[in-house]
Amino acid sequence: MKLPTKLNGMKKAGDIPLLICVFLMACFGCLMIYSASSYTADVQYGDKLYFVKKQILGVVLGAAAMIGTAFLPYKKLAKFKYPAIIIAAILLALVFVPGIGITNYGATRWIGFGGVTIQPSEIAKYSFALFSAAYFAKNYEKVKTVRGVLPVLAVGIGFCLLIIIEPNMSITMCVGLLMLGIIFLSGTNLKTFAVILIPFVVAVPVLIILEPYRLQRLSAFIDPWASPKDEGYQLIQSLYALGNGGFFGTGLFNSTQKYRFLPFAESDFILAIMGEELGFLGLMLFFAVSAFIVIRGFKIARRCSDRFGFLLAAGFTLVYGIQVLINALVVTGTIPPTGLPLPLISSGNTSLIITMASMGVLYNVSRSN
């Protein structure tokens, strides 16, 4: 006898382990931010909890957003594909408006309204993933030609241009790789994909050459000791932290590099502090949990019965996976240094809230499988 849908509802419970894992990662991020920032926060603001208080607020808001998106039917999001990219483009443009855009360390990547600061590029990544998923789901018969994928290319390249002039090379790379990933997963043929891929590969060295500071960072990556007090300083301090951690780490709260030796210890380079305090074993555990999130995300996508859900889940998973990978490569000196937060861990509420909300969407897709 076939059970009624409501009685058979246990199959609709969704991927609860994913939500639990994401929430625990966000809580772990608060712990590491306290460890990495307590000294700097005390010196600069007279409050050891300055950064972690903000992050805890972000976790609360992010959890609320995750719960909200977990029970908002994901198919309704397709209706917001155009508003999403329009809002993201406006926010990216507002970065350059005097009085609204906020400049730190030579880069204008944030906008401020009152006491609230937002990083529009973090929103743009997920808006682009939503738009691409909705477009390809509706126009799946056009994906075999360059002309068919042109709208996605236009939006992706437009976002990349707005982000690169902030300047923000790392997020530009994330959006570019996300664009290639979604186009590939849309079902395009290899010939069309190659035509798109070649200009992208050529653009990377061109963008590096066009800006002197990127050439300096490339030089520092090749030989950080050539400028140990300038461009090579941050990478050297990061490698010191990782080397000091060894196999088992120095122990939680026992980092020495966080005493203002390593810049951005609580944000872009928090992975180095994790490596110093928790050691190689701790980092391997962190990467295992990150891989768990990525694998669950792709499994959710693979099991989804409709194209939009498949591409939406895959796109959101790609955003998380690409960002973790690039951050790890930067911190370990595998690629030239560039500023990029570690999702769910680094200090910064825009990235945290948006990432947790995207994981709620993944859960929602899993409920329909």
Image (tube, grey):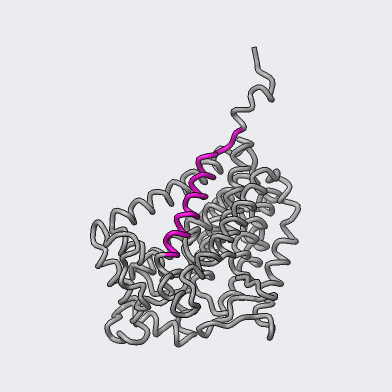
The quadrant where residue 251 appears: bottom left
Residue at point 69%, 77% (across, down): 94
Q: Is residue 37 left or right of residue 315?
A: left
Q: Is residue 142 magenta?
A: no
Q: Nearer the viewer, residue 179 or 108?
A: 108
In this rendering, the answer to whether 99 lies above or below 152 is below
Q: Nearer the viewer, residue 159 or 320?
A: 320
Q: Nearer the viewer, residue 134 or 106?
A: 106
Q: Is residue 202 left or right of residue 75?
A: left
Residue 87 is at least partly visible in this image: yes
Residue 277 point in image, percent of width and height: 31, 62
Q: How many numbered discs, if any?
A: 0
Residue 37 point in image, percent of width and height: 43, 70
The segment highlighted magenta reads 13-34
Residue positioned most to the front: 46
Residue positioned most to the top: 1
Residue 203 is at least partly visible in this image: no
Residue at point 62%, 61% (across, down): 146
Give the main secondary structure, helix, strand or loop, of the magenta stretch: helix
Q: Quadrant of the C terminus?
A: top right
The quadrant where residue 166 appears: bottom right
Residue at point 49%, 43% (across, down): 296
Q: Is residue 278 left or right of residue 303?
A: left
In this rendering, the answer to whether 338 lies above or below 53 is below
The quadrant where residue 129 appears: bottom right
Q: Is residue 29 magenta?
A: yes
